[in-house]
Amino acid sequence: MTDTRYSTLINTRFHDLLISYDFARKHNGAHLQAMAEMFTEQEQRQLLDVEVKAKSERDAVEQAKEQHRQKKDLELNQLVSDSVIEQLNDVDNIFENTLNIQDSIPAILDILSVRAANIARIEPLVMNLAWLEQDMVQFVNLPGYRPTKEGKPIRVDKARSALSYIGIDNLKMVVPTFALRKWIPHSTEPFRLMKRKMWEAGLGAAVSCKRLALIHNLDQNIAFTAAAFHGLGQSAIVRLYLRRFDAIWKEQLEFARERRLKQDHEAIAALEPSGEALRNLMIDHTPRLSAELIKRFDLKRLMIHPPMQEYAAADVREMSPLAVIMNKAICYSRYKLLQRHGLIAKHEAKIYFKENNLTAAEVTELNKLSMRRLNLRLEQQYN
């Protein structure tokens, strides 16, 4: 990741948006203007001395409660963050249990990367993953892709038929895309829309990177897959944080209850996962963890680990051409997500692009793409 001053600001803003739109607005000084309060003539009267005193006492009590809540919030989230960071050292456990990455996916990706790839070699591996088989069948039965026979739409219900219809070239994009969607947390409550934004950011980076690879005559398959998985560590961190928060929150609540610490119990009971704590964990640890997880794929042919490792090192001067375009693609994908939510100005985008070496010609080409769909071309006839 480019560690220039302005890019750091924009990348932080992107992670703020992953938490929520309101969180991003708040942390970037774009507060909504409050509506002017309307008082009736009776409400505008001067408070009596006794009322002033009572209100002052109530405010003092509420302020003390809020300060204590904030104190417990900081303490709890420090415990959660420390626990998550400790777990990040066990990449094998994250690979196998947190994300539950099955060996069939790396095997399929390796097969698809060679010229001799065919449906017969891929089918048994797809059949070994019930979720992937189901996704393939559902995909080809979507209105935009549904096959036809003699001009009439037909329903596909077998994996082999779905795979044949999609075709080897398209599977190079479809398999990483379905895997990405599978590994993103199914629930990110209370950050309700986070999973959708994670999905859009990953897909947008992949689509952008494939187009940049075409422009620069680089391997489009490696480019697409590496960019699609650049946030794999992010998915793991979100899962770990939400699980550890829930567990430690319950432990702290029980501790306060058993010791009859009423003030602590009330404060802890009101706490929710911290957007700021989770954002900081994602910013600090995602690139390295993503590269470490991809290393566990043990890919023999699809060389996506080197560019991801270079990206994690964050030194543009040492990046290979593939890592350079991956960095550009991630930059553009983040820009599009921020733009869609009105969180980046034109002059900011220009500086962001310049710092990440995105040329005007490249931006023009990327502007032609849809960031939220693969735009596949499938055979129209089904045999």
Image (spheres, rainbow, N blue to C red):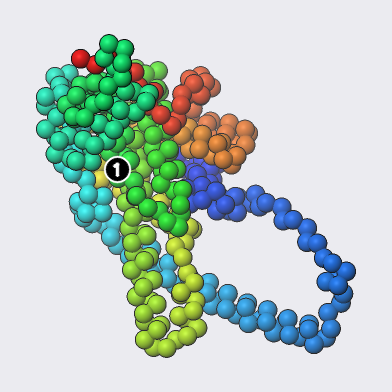
Give the percent coordinates (x, y) of residue 98.
Answer: 26, 54
Q: Nearer the viewer, residue 143 or 75?
A: 143
Position of the N terminus, as image quadrant, is top left
Give the percent coordinates (x, y) of residue 46.
Answer: 86, 77
How many residues crowd around disc 1 within 10 Å: few (fewer than 14), some, or many (20 or more)? Answer: some
Is residue 313 in sight in this rendering? no
Is residue 123 in sight in this rendering? yes
Q: Is residue 111 above or below residue 83?
A: above
Residue sitting farthest toward the top: 150
Q: Is residue 95 left or right of residue 310?
A: left
Total numbered badges shown on the rendered structure: 1
Q: Nearer the viewer, residue 264 or 155?
A: 155
Residue depicted at x 38% and y 23%: 144
Q: Is residue 258 above or below residue 327?
A: below
Secondary structure under tag 1 reads: helix
Residue depicted at x 34% and y 64%: 244
Q: Is residue 277 left or right of residue 346?
A: left
Residue depicted at x 26% and y 57%: 89
Give the percent coordinates (x, y) of residue 196.
Answer: 43, 43
Residue depicted at x 34% and y 23%: 145
- Residue occupied by mark 1: 182
Give the percent coordinates (x, y) of residue 276.
Answer: 49, 58
Q: Is residue 225 left or right of residue 54?
A: left
Residue 55 occupies quadrant: bottom right
Check disc 1 and give the amino acid type: Lys
Position of the C terminus, as image quadrant, is top left
Q: Nearer the viewer, residue 17 or 281?
A: 17
